[in-house]
Image (tube, rainbow, N blue to C red):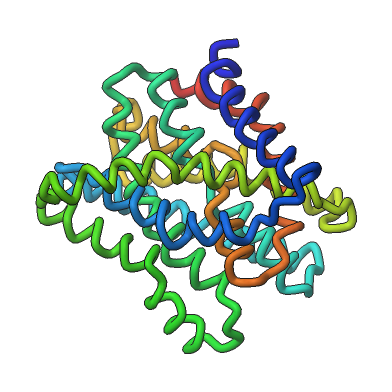
Amino acid sequence: MSLAISVVFPVAVAVLCGFALGRWGQVPAAPLAKAGVYVFGPALLLANVPATLANDLPLLALTVGAALLMLVVGRVLAAALGETDPDRRDAIVFATGFSNFGFVGLPLVELAFGPEAFAMGIAVLTFLNIPTGILAVFLASPQPSVVGALRHTMREPFSIAVVASLILGLGGLSLPNVVQRPLDLLADGAIPCMLVVLGIQLASLDRQDFSLASAVAVLVARLLISPAVVFGIAVIAGMDIDGLAVKCATLQLATPPGITPLIFMITFGRNPGPLAGLIFWGTIGSVFTVPLVAGLLR
């Protein structure tokens, strides 16, 4: 009950507001998605750089390694399901590889492991923004060639913010207050913006956007296999599996599909329908699987 009240209910309210705007207000998702990609998202990255990032390099290897491995799992799933349409194929890859480690993950680890877990959750968020920020822009790029997609990626403000936040965190640097305060203000709008965009997109969701087999396969991979992969890597690497770092990383990678790739697909003119559907059903499924994972970790 506490999970539903603290995490799921606020998400549902924001998404329902977006759904109402899309269904009855006829508000398009693209302008708001662009605001998230070019303004709110970069501000969120730069406003939340942990000061001790350089001390958590094993956590960096764990989180990024697990995320990259799940991207490979997503690609294998798409091939096994016979998806040849680029938008449907990439939707499976995104939904399998990228979790909602921010808006859902941060309050979740604090709820499960106490207030001291929030700072560790921020470190996990920062590290996971490496594949989410860079690879999501790359994979969602409208450029057909690898070189073109790479150039497109490195010109995006979101990618630049990822690199800048890593430099600041690993160097133990902080932004001056005159810069930090407006960033904090803009960062507060990032996650609500993305949730509202998801709701707007769900208002136009077509049942043909994805198959039942795709949804089931992605949900199993995202919600059950992903945390097992994180925990397994931690065991193999000899990390302290009872430590807060491993527990936070495992739980944050057990959350439903992330919204950030959806924002990129809308902004870059791709078909976001398949991914929106997988995010929706993944979020519903996580209500049952996330408490299970949290209970096992505790």
Residue 264 sits above or below residue 110 on the image? below
Rendered view: 61 above or below 115: below
Q: Residue at point 12% right, 49% down? A: 174
Relative to 99, 245 lies left or right: left
Image coordinates of residue 42 in percent, x first then y, are 36, 56
Say which of 230 and 145 sits in front: 145
In terms of image quadrants, where is residue 274? bottom right
Image position of 275 (left or right of 37): right
Residue 217, can we see it?
no
In this view, the residue in front, 233 or 118, is 118
Q: Residue at x 25, y 56 (%)?
A: 165
Answer with the quarter of the image where residue 115 lies: top left
Percent across and percent down for residue 207 are: 88, 51
| Image location (x, y in percent) of residue 25 | 75, 45
Q: Position of residue 255 (x, y in %)?
A: 55, 37
Above or below for 246 versus 295: below
Q: Quadrant of the C terminus?
A: top left
Residue 2 in which image quadrant: top right
